[in-house]
Amino acid sequence: MQLGHPGAVFLKSDWFYNVVVTTHALMMIFFAVMPILIGAFGNWLIPLLVGGKDMIYPRMNNLSYWLSPNALYLLMLSFSTDKGVGAGWTIYPPLSVYPYHSGPSMDVLIVSLHLAGLSSLVGAINFASTNKNMPVLEMKGERAELYVLSISVTAVLLIISIPVLGGGITMILFD
């Protein structure tokens, strides 16, 4: 089975191959790694490790959770709208702008990534505030668990980087 060229047996279209690779990469990054490794394990382990019953803002936790399925739905919609998004997982121009994506599929994908980013941002704010304000077991500084420290660093990095990502993909949307 060869997938590397347009005349392949399995995938007849080179554009469809790009669409499948793009959708797979975005699903793995924004809907598998981020929500499962950071969101699910963080929501389960952080309250246990800091000695609380739940995260400090449970409604923010709920908002972060319910934004993810909507963003995933829009990602799958962008896969099936028009010809799909075949710009690669980085969504760099020129593949993500006018001559290659003149239809609504790129716009739907960008809205999907905005929702996924908002979900991660809300979750990161909740993790950072929980780790800062709720160490019940006097586990601050060098006495803190390594997982709590790693989630705190990850939350700060997400709070810094997600608005930059949102600004970049908004510029692609307006291009």
Image: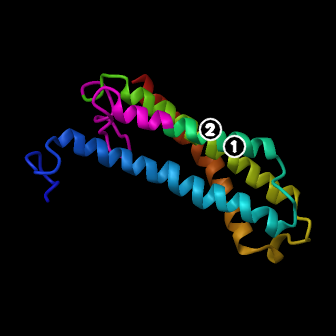
Name the residue tied to disc 1: 122
Tell me if residue 80 can be seen: yes
- Residue 125 in picture, x, y percent from top left: 73, 47
Return the residue found at the far left. 7
Of the numbered discs 1 and 2, the one sitting upstream in the chain is 2
- Residue 81 in picture, x, y percent from top left: 35, 28
| Quarter placement of the N terminus | bottom left
Left or right of 156? Residue 7 is left
Q: Foreground mark, 1 or 2?
A: 2
Magenta residues, as a range? 73-99
What residue lies at 62% left-to-right and 46% top-to-bottom?
120
Instruction: Label the magenta part by its dominant secondary structure.
Output: loop
Q: Report the Cα–Cα distance between label 1 and label 2.
A: 10 Å
Name the residue tied to disc 2: 67
Q: Can residue 94 be found in the magenta stretch?
A: yes
Relative depth, front residue between 89 and 140: 89
| Quarter placement of the C terminus | top left
What residue lies at 51% left-to-right and 54% top-to-bottom?
32
